[in-house]
Image (cartoon, rainbow, N blue to C red):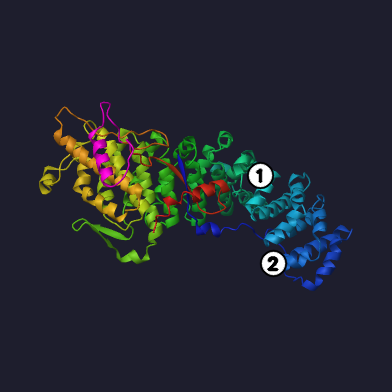
Amino acid sequence: MTIDEFDPDDLLVEINRKLANVSIQSANLTDTVHKNALSSLRYYLHSDNIETCFVGAHNLRKYLTQATEPGHVDDLLELDILPRIKQLLSYHEHSELQFECAWIVTNIAAGTSEHTNALVEADFIGALLEILYSKISTTTSKAQAAWALSNFAGESPALRELLLTNSAIGAVANVLDSVCDEIMDDAIERSYSSGRVTIRDHDLCIDVKALTWSLSNMCRGGFRTADYWDMYLPAFYSLSQCAIFDHKDIWIDSCWGLSRILYNMHEVTSFYDAVPISPQLCSRLAQLLTERTISIIVPVLRCIINITSGPNEYSALLLDTPLLTNLGTLTPTSIPIPIRRDSFLVVSNLAASNETLVNQVIQSHEIMESVVAHVHVPGHTYHEDTIQWFPTVSNAYYNLADEWKITTEALWALSNLTNLASDDSICTMLASHPQIPKSLSALLNYMNMPLSTCIKGLDVIITIIGRTNKIAYTRLPSSARLTDQENKDSPSIPSSSNPYIEQFINQGLPTLLPCLRKVHQKSMELQKRCVILASLLETAVSSDQSSTSGDKSTITTTTTTTTTATTTTSSSSSGSTPSSSTSSNLAAMFGLSLPPSFITTGANKRRVLRGHEDGDIRLIENAVGNLSITEGVQ
């Protein structure tokens, strides 16, 4: 199961939906065009002489590029020149004139909604598409026409859907694909053997940047993007090629575009059956994580998140690269919050894939150390002697709300790992990171943590106990049990054959649960988890005390190897186990009704929608309806 969450990101607000072109080609802007010259320029524009017509178009374009205020666009629209501009766009044999007119349309479309809609009503979409389909028009004119169409796309989801119905995305993708093929042919003879492809022609590089940004912008969400899945295939292929080019701006826009496509196409089986997610793309994405610029790393991570939330075979391709090694460098506390959080989301999704991929994550020591290290109260240190968290000197500088999201993300990773890992990997993880039970217990001692974090912490503990109960007598190392001295130091603490239950009890978990129930009285989800956890602890001890050496009755946790895995307490074939009876009694005490098998969230892949235009509108509505995951962060 994949969970959609809605958590708007200020970063997306800063990414332009519409851009005026003031620098696509080197131009002489030293001569200012004044408003009182516009009537003469309109006369030139309608001339039958191509050179005179070009002078009119060129200077009208200069008037627009002198300033991007709406007033300049209004001045041009008052000239009633749109029909003539549209006519001149069809002059494919006059490339410079066509380019100037496409530039004018681009900057008008970059204006207000009224400006963009005026162009749509005048059927400029069809005129711009003719340029893209033309065999005569230059690449530069096509890049400018694509830019104009992209400004239409940036206006609204409705216009993006209109462009889809007119096959605009495919038209731009085909132009970009053709240009990429030419660049690659040249690069094979020159630099591609070194793994880096540089576009040597400066003007061509500018055209590729314009085409890449345009295609990426057109791939924003709409109302029924999934219905047009086949139109996104050429776009995905072209943007994948652009990710190879050794130019920062092209990396960024191609990764944003790939991320948007993958988000829109989530669970669209036909798309994934045909999409060309190649080992080369996965390798390139992993490589780009080594960049140290946030504007590059963020779109790369968003792209990887959307890959890992999809079919497991693509997650496997990513793990054939140095992805985990490179992610490990992005998780220390010194790394900016957005990057750390997205990095942990990638880890969490990988941990919700299948047993093989989960085991690979567990074997990544640096990743696991970072995950466990983030199971803590942000901006605080824990004092074991007083069993309290105290603010650090730097606490005032923490963005606590966002730091808590990272803590929750780390708990999601642990929850997924403990649900899906093999018995061997569970043993390896707990043996290699013995502080996990102590860290989880210490975290629950902080009663002011967000509800979502608390619930996820309880999920992890329930799953650890269930999984280790199953293998307590045969697989768990005796070194995990309390030492004789520790038992002497805490004689009131009952013992269990499961050493991890002993650790949780020794950390005071039984006394914490009533406190948590009191603090979160209105949360039925938390109440249920507290009841079942109390019953697990009580039953494990009571059954161990009453059983003989040959009676190894335990509470088991059933874990599946799919992303919809759940954690349950199972009933024995001869009737109810002590745990079901105990949990029912406890539930009745607190007015709760628990099913025979209590179900936690299990292992889930997740996608976080960062903005209102970052995916299919239907997916946004679904994510907004699931706000309970993130709204608990205080």
- Residue 233: image x %, image y %? 62, 39
Query: How many angstroms separate mark 1 from mark 2 (CA)?
Result: 30 Å
Asked whether residue 243 appears in the rendered view, the answer is: no
- Neighbor class of circle 2 (other Cα within 10 Å; few <14, some 14-19, many 20+) is some
User: For residue 322, which quarter of the picture?
Assistant: top left
User: For residue 460, which quarter of the picture?
Assistant: top left
Residue type (three-letter) at the residue carrying disc 2: Pro
Q: Which residue is mark 2?
A: 70
Q: Which residue sits at x=66%, y=44%?
A: 173
Q: Quadrant of the C terminus?
A: bottom left
Q: Magenta includes 588?
A: yes
Q: Which residue sits at x=22%, y=42%?
A: 537
Q: Magenta includes 350?
A: no
Q: Is residue 67 left or right of residue 574?
A: right
Asked whether residue 609 appears in the rendered view, the answer is: yes
Pick the front one: 395 or 524: 524
Which stretch appears magenta?
A: 569-597
**Callout 2 secondary element:** helix
- Residue 514: image x %, image y %? 25, 51
Q: Quadrant of the N terminus?
A: top left
**Callout 1 secondary element:** helix
Residue type (three-letter) at the residue carrying disc 1: Ala
- Residue 205: image x %, image y %? 65, 52
Q: Which residue is mark 1?
A: 173
The residue mark sitting in front, 1 or 2, is 2
Q: How many dots with numbers?
A: 2
- Residue 311: image x %, image y %? 49, 36
* Vertical position of residue 188 compared to residue 29: above or below: above
Mark 1 or mark 2: whose residue is earlier in sequence? 2
- Neighbor class of circle 1 (other Cα within 10 Å; few <14, some 14-19, many 20+) is many
